[in-house]
Amino acid sequence: MALYKDEKRSTWYCKVNYLNEVGKLISHTKRGFKLKRDAINYESSFRCEQYEKQEIPVPENPVVIVEPVKELLFQDLFVKYIENKRHEAEDYNVNKYIQVANRFFPSIMKKSMSKIKPSDYLECRNFIESQKAAVRYRNKAIFLLKSVSRFGFDYYELRDHARLLKVIPLKSTEFKEREVWTPDQFKLFIEHVDHVVYKSYFTFLYYSGVRRSEARAVEKKDIVDGCVSINKSMHQYKNEFKSLKTNASRRRIQLNQHVLDMIAPLLERDGPLLFGDYEDLSSTSIQRYFSNGIKKCNQVLEGIGEKPIPKIRLHDMRHSHATFLINKGANIVAVSKRLGHSDINMTLKVYTHLLKENENQILELLE
């Protein structure tokens, strides 16, 4: 295959040597192809035309005809993207990508990548925005569309036509303040969790700020001198360890005395795991005890005419921990390290609104 890259013009060209009708060797050059596959297709078509003109026998060592490159559809590229993702993401998250694509990308799935235009991606993006779903979920679809397009650019020499797509802005009427629990609200909740292991697990989450998968992976040997070493995570749906989210996630956290007293009986039990002994706690069981605890707590509160506690997500226990620390004046850098954030900017992005609430304290110091 005589294909060459014209670095100066950033184009491709091909050279074809062939025998004409009278058996004379001819050299033919064609320039100006923007894509490599276009040059391949031209070379193949040109050779076929020349052979059709020949009436002489085929030489003993015929030139091999290059078959035209098969058209790559968007759905083919998406399959390749998913296959690559399975090496770095959990099956649960990868399956979410597939669900998002099936819902939001039907208009471009059957389109050829060589024929997809920027306007096709724009129409798909506008279709996503028109759907009834949370802004965060629709933006996840737009990010996925951009990621697939970028994947094609990086590995298959395709144009990244989706790079200019904008996410959907969050309207002021759609913004919802993240709900968290105060320590008093957590105490009301934990009284209605009637299983000692899950009661200890939720207490550990609230007062340490670790991710739920990190807590599930904690072993008894990781508790030393009142500190827990976070050095691994637990697969969401498999009873096996996995690496941490980032290098910064590897950390040592000091535990308060209330948590140490709560987990003390668990440390005396058999089995390597702090929560679950020989088998880690299942995600479904954790969610069931968490939801039931909130439900029972609010039934009691409503029965005595008290305000119910917010129905937060399990992950919001981590936000509750950080919110409590920042509101009490904890150093933002220390909070960031405790949470295992790879960059303090990530902490600032999530909790800036709490820092703004402390501006009055700053003014008092200045005065």
Image: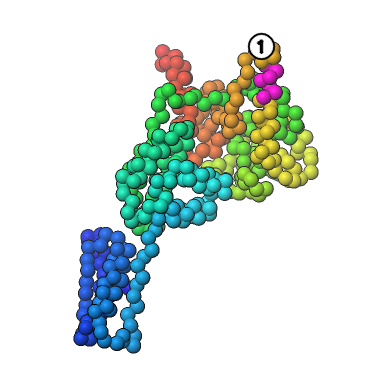
Give the answer, above or below, for where 152 lies relative to 264.
below
Res. 207 image quadrant: top right
- Front residue of 182 and 367: 182
Residue 271 placement (x, y as % from top left): 76, 45
Q: Is residue 32 visible?
A: yes
Give the answer, above or below, for where 125 lies relative to 194.
below
Residue 314 placement (x, y as % from top left): 61, 32
Does the magenta segment cover residue 297? Answer: yes
Residue 135 placement (x, y as % from top left): 45, 33
- Front residue of 187 and 296: 296
Find disc 1 in the rendering and name its residue: 305
Query: Which residue is painted at 71% across and 39% down in the image?
Result: 275
Main secondary-structure element of the magenta-colored stretch = helix
Query: Which residue is painted at 26% across and 70% down in the image?
Result: 14
Res. 69 image quadrant: bottom left
Give the answer, above or below, for where 80 lies relative to 20.
above
For this orientation, the residue located farthest to the top is: 305
Residue 250 placement (x, y as % from top left): 57, 43
- Front residue of 332 and 155: 155
Q: Which segment did they paint magenta?
A: 295-301
